[in-house]
Amino acid sequence: MQIQSPDEVDDAPPRRLWSPWRMRYVGGDAAEPGCIFCNRIGGNDDVDSLILYRAPLSCAIMNLFPYNTGHIMLVPNEHVASPEDASLDALTEIATLLPKVLRALRRVLACHGFNIGLNVGSVAGAGVAEHMHQHVVPRWNGDANFMPILAGTTVMPELIPVTYSKLRAELSRESGTDSSVAVRWVLLDRNGEYVWLNAGAELPVVRPEPDAAIWRTVIEAAVGAGAGASVRVAGWAGSSRSDKGQPALALVADEELDDLGSFVPIEKARAMLAPDERQVLAQALKTHI
Ligand SMILES: [Zn+2]
């Protein structure tokens, strides 16, 4: 298996059937000045940067050019090219982060195995050679099927912002001191004009069982609340920074709702919600697809 870097992809045959998130890079952002990892680690919009988790010396970032769904990179915050230049503390932290990432990937994506590794130096295939990054690529039985072999193509079954929100919620739970986590969910109607509120005029919260995937528990709660069977995760609804705030997922009801029941018009909901809940709602509307 090869990890494709942006440079390598340019001359290669098409790798993905459908990858709309790549448009912003095709549009010119790929040539950003400086180091793409340092730029993201130094920024504040972790949702846009696809930073899933921040530890004091390192972080977990989703790959912008994934080989497979859920392709994550573990990156030291310091700009070093190779483990021999990194601090032992940063390397230890990354080693501690790895099992958390594996557990999160298994719960979210039900993968069967992983490729884990470092490409050090351009000659070894590193796309960004000056800032080391450890790849974690989920694998499934049968994923090396005829598509990548015959057509050089990988089918990406889920939009990156959706996978991002599911994984970030799980990593937030992994970073906690116990496996119990409170997760907010924001359910919007398909047009993003109404939001479902509890009777007490609050955004609802669930506490998933330790072994249950957070996103599944949230979907079940929304369906149980009367949203109908066609509910999907649309994106992240919590804080922009992954080291702040509790996890929150934005959901969308795909069907036209006949009975709006506990759905409240967005404008009215804004007036009813507490300030921190208004922020969660605003983020949900931003990631509403
Ligand atoms: Zn860097």
Image (cartoon, rainbow, N blue to C red):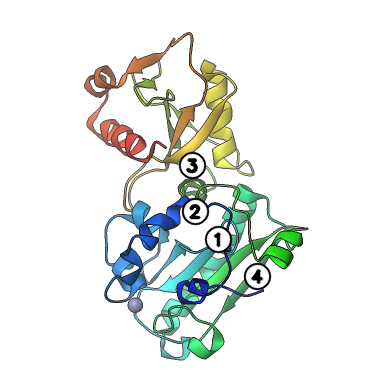
Residue 101: which numbered mark, if any? Answer: 1
User: Label 3 to label 4, Cα distance in Å?
Assistant: 29 Å
Residue marked by disc 3: 181
Q: Is residue 200 visible?
A: no
Q: Position of residue 231 (x, y in %)?
A: 54, 28
137 or 154, which is in the foreground?
154
For marks 3 and 1 on the same chain, the one whose residue lies earlier in the sequence:
1
The residue at the point 36 percent across, 57 percent down is 24
Up the image or down, 81 lies above or below 265; here it is below
Residue marked by disc 4: 115
Kindly identify the amino acid type of the residue bearing the numbered disc 1: Val
User: Label 2 to label 3, Cα distance in Å?
Assistant: 11 Å
Kindly identify the amino acid type of the residue bearing the numbered disc 2: Leu
For marks 3 and 4 on the same chain, the one whose residue lies earlier in the sequence:
4
Question: Is the shortest distance between ligand 1 and the CB of mark 2 under 8 Å?
Answer: no
For marks 2 and 1 on the same chain, the one whose residue lies earlier in the sequence:
1
Kindly identify the amino acid type of the residue bearing the numbered disc 4: Asn
User: Label 3 to label 1, Cα distance in Å?
Assistant: 17 Å
The residue at the point 44 percent across, 53 percent down is 21
Where is the C terminus found, in terms of image quarters? top left
Residue 171: which numbered mark, if any? Answer: 2
Q: Give the number of the mark in front: 3 or 4.
A: 4
Q: Position of residue 266 (x, y in %)?
A: 29, 22
**Quarter of the image where ligand 1 sits:** bottom left
For marks 4 and 2 on the same chain, the one whose residue lies earlier in the sequence:
4
Residue 25: which numbered mark, if any? Answer: none
Q: Give the number of the mark in front: 3 or 1.
A: 1
Q: Give the number of the mark in front: 1 or 4.
A: 4
Q: Position of residue 115 (x, y in %)?
A: 65, 70
Do the residues bearing badges 2 and 1 touch, measured as CB atoms within 8 Å? Answer: yes
For marks 1 and 4 on the same chain, the one whose residue lies earlier in the sequence:
1
